[in-house]
Amino acid sequence: MAANDVDVDFHQAPDRRGSGSLKWDLHGGDALPFWVADMDFTSPPEVVAALEKRAAHGVFGYAYPTIEEKEAVLHYLRTRHRIHAEGSWLVWLPGLVPALSVTAAVARTQGARSILTCTPIYPPFLKAPLDGALDVLQVPLVEESGRLTWDRQALEEAVRPDTGLFILCNPHNPVGRVYTREELDWLGDFCARHELLLCSDEIHCDLILDEERTPHISALHLDHDWQKSIITLMAASKTYNIAGVGCAFAVIPDGNLRVAFRQAMGCWIAPVNVFGYTATAAAFRHGEPWRQALLETLRDNHAFFADYLATHHPDLPLTKAEATYLAWLDVRPLGTDIHLVAHFQKHGLTLSNGRDFGAPGFVRWNLGCPRAMLAEGLKRFSHAISALP
Ligand SMILES: Cc1ncc(COP(=O)(O)O)c(C=O)c1O
């Protein structure tokens, strides 16, 4: 049993091979998958029970959120994030990746020809902007006092008169930064001065490892005047491991921007399926003890991972994560020309390639798995390194 008497054992996970899991079945074989961002833990039992109840109903026509499901999201925003949203601000979506494309489409409709983001970054940020119709201006993060942050001067230099959108990831996948109030105020001002829409992807906002030291501050807390240009994206999917049920939402306080967003969705974006609302509401309503137990497990896994690397591969710089179950590792010191990710794959380890995030020479690990799997993955990692030519 995990901590907090939660009825999920975070030391174990069901066998997902052959279950139609993207993470486990895409590459097949015996490689252990530490790539795509879903965890191997079963979701909170209340979520499973709610889905079973919904399935037992037996009618699966087009879905619409019930008043209780909508209220579960508003209650979550109020109690977890001190955001007093109105129901009308919510735009439901089958996922946040489509929302990135929709946001880019809004910017383009408003005349933008380029968008701005900071790398390394979750790959769809680089691809979603209408498949090449907008230039994606990438500004690398810089290290300041041991933490990665935006390069303010470089952003001022990179922004163009035709730039219409900044896409923010907070907490930042893959580096795990949780931005401070001062940083966010600077960004809000930057976007206002350059008349940029701000899209804040906050899908990882309930996976803060130390909520006292690095609390999440939503873009919805930024200056009231700036809200007419802010689209905030959220979901229960990462935290409660329900990405496969496909439900997310944008919170857009400004009515005009909301209309533009809905228009850009047009007929391109599928509605949320019947299970999406159910799982999201159950997770927000009942998932808190499970989330606390998960966070304890993730803190332990991050510490275990960092200790192992410090002991066995002290030459590989690891970015200290403040949030998420992701770890960002610099493997450039291995100093080799060979395709490292393919090499790790050959040695039984599937990792995400930093190149896809705009940072070749890095790998991203997913630590959302039982400790034994992580330990085995690290063993394979060391073995792969010792087998390098
Ligand atoms: C920052 C970020 N945004 C969006 C997504 C994916 O969202 P969805 O599955 O809702 O499309 C991920 C998945 O890892 C992510 O890390």
Image (spheres, grey):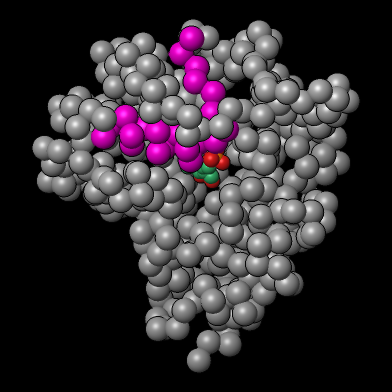
Query: Quick check: 298 left or right of 327?
Result: right
The image quarter containing residue 114 is top left
Most foreground residue, 162 or 175: 162
| Majority secondary structure of magenta residues | helix
Image quarter in which the N terminus is found: top right
Residue at the spot 58% in from the left edge and 75% down from the top edge: 344
Query: Quick check: 352 left or right of 30?
Result: left
Residue at the spot 39% in from the left edge and 17% down from the top edge: 258
Q: Position of residue 297 (x, y in %)?
A: 69, 45
Asked if the stretch drawn in magenta spans residue 107, the answer is yes
Query: Quick check: 65 left or right of 88?
Result: right
Q: Position of residue 183 (x, y in %)?
A: 30, 33
Q: Position of residue 152 (x, y in %)?
A: 20, 42
Asked if the stretch drawn in magenta spans residue 137, the answer is no
Which residues make up the magenta segment? Answer: 88-108
Residue lying farthest front?
267
Residue at the spot 71% in from the left edge and 68% down from the top edge: 28
Q: Is residue 350 above or below residue 89?
A: below
Residue lying farthest bottom?
389
